[in-house]
Structure formats: C-alpha cells, structure tokens
Amino acid sequence: MALSHNLNLASQGTSLKALFSGYLIVVAVGYLMALVQIQLTHGLADGEYGLSVDDIVYSYYGNRSGSLLENKLHGSMKPMASDEERAQIITWIHQGATEETYESSGVKQIFEAKCIACHNADSGMPIPDYTNFQAIKDRALVDTGASFSSLARVSHIHLFGIAFIFMFVGLIFSLAAGVPKPLKVIAICTPYAFLLVDIASWWLTKLNPNFAWLVIVAGGSMALSFAFMWLVSMYEMWILPRRGVDDRDALLDE
C-alpha cells in the first residue's frame, strides 16, 4: 500500500512557516541594503544617481580620462568635501601630485580633516589608507578601475555568500506546490547561473568595457529570480487557500 505524501509550503505548521518567513524577510531586507550599497558606490561613479553602463565601466575598467582620486571626487566622494576643497585637490593632481606640494598647498590638511577619519588602517573597511602618502599618490594616477587583487577578493566573497543565500531561498521555494516543475527548476537554477555570469562579467569588463552591459543583465536576472521565489513562497505559506491541504497544526493538536 503506497503512502500518500503532501509536503508543500501550505501544509507546513505555523512554527515552520514563521521560521521560513523570518529568514525570507531578513534576506529581502539584506538584498535591499545591497542595492542601496551598490547605488552609493558604483551608482555614483559617473557623478550622477542611478546605475548606468558608464558607472559599471568606471568601476571595473576605469575612467581613463583622469585619475581615480579625481573621478571619486566627482562621483561617490563628492559630498565629502566642499567645491573649493575638491577643486584644490584636483588642481594639485593636475600639477603632478608631488609630496612636497601635498604638504605646502594645504591639500594635506584637507585629507586630514575630511578623509582620514575613514581612510585609515584601523577603519576595518576595504578602502585605501590615506595616512600613507603613497596610497594617495597611487590613486592620483590614471584611473584603471578595480585592481585584479580586489576583484579576486570580492569575487570569492560573493560566490560563497550569495550561493548560500540562494540555497536556502531555493530550498524553501522548492516546497511550493503551485509552480510547474520545469518553471521551478529554472527559477532555482537561474540565480546560480547568473551569479557565475555576474562574477565573470566583472573580470571581462576590467579587460574590455564593452562587457559592462553584462553586469547589469546578470544582476537584474538574479534580482528577478529572487523576487519570484520570495513572492511565491510567501504567497503559498500565508495567502493560498488551504482547502484539501493537510493542516499540520491541527494534526499536532489531536
């Protein structure tokens, strides 16, 4: 005699639904924070709000018409200094960015007042240490975008971290009963495939700016697959009618 089995999201008990929902909500908030962080870092690379292909090019390939420091002052670091202070730093860069003029022109005082509070060895953030003049000098050279060492560091962090997130989101979604199996398989596999495409596109854009559009396509595809699995999972747990579905809470109460 075959045993019938109806393991799906709607049939789970309230405790397990609360566990799944709590995880999904926290991960969704984390995803939103990641989008904000992308906007505040890459999204301002061209000096304007909103993520564009130019932002991607400047972030990974670089804006080779100027120095990294100058481009940051026009972009994400623009609010950190006044127009006069930014102009003073940029003038110093155009004049050769020497250590002698760094101290005599007043640029050093600007860095100490506006930059070194964050840009120091004790900040714990993956940003240059501006208490060391050589770090400033290196960024006063032509902007070639992200370094290969930083790409390697960020790549392995994203591969491990995001893969774990989508493993648990996909595991919860796999219990959805109202999604055809082929569509379910595609939705679960999509973020993994585009995670690899996303990481590869960073390296490709570093070598050739024409690949910048691939970064946006890959990131957008991951976001859409996440949103689809999240919405379906929450719908089936809390909104889907439960007629004909085993109520585990009721069984436990008997």
Image (cartoon, helix red, strand yellow):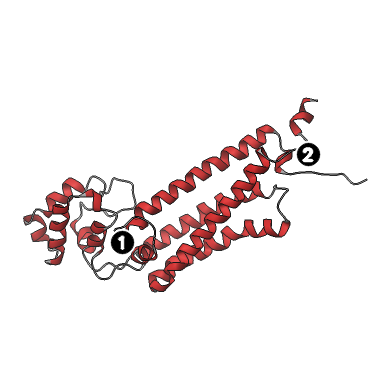
Left or right: 77, with 250 as reference point: left
Q: Residue furthest right?
A: 1
The quarter in which the C terminus is drawn is top right
Q: Give, as a three-letter code, the residue at label 2.
A: Val
Specify which label sits upstream in the sequence, 1 or 2: 1
Work out whether residue 136 or residue 22 is closer to the camera in this orientation and state it.
Answer: 22
Residue 194 visible from this viewpoint = yes
Q: Give, as a three-letter code, the residue at label 1.
A: Asp
Q: Residue furthest left?
A: 104
The structure residue drawn at horizontal position 70% and vertical position 42%, both measured from the top left corner, is 9
The structure residue drawn at horizontal position 28% and vertical position 55%, both measured from the top left corner, is 128
Give the secondary structure at mark 2. loop
Spot occupied by residue 156 in the image (x, y as percentages of width and height): 47, 58
**Disc 1 from disc 2: Cα separation:** 54 Å
Give the residue at mark 2: 245
Residue 23 sits in which quadrant? top right
Number of residues whose C-alpha sits closer than 10 Å to that of mark 2, classed few (under 14), some (14–19) or many (20 or more): few
Give the residue at mark 1: 46
Tell how many labels: 2
Left or right: 202, with 112 as reference point: right
Spot occupied by residue 13 in the image (x, y as percentages of width and height): 71, 34
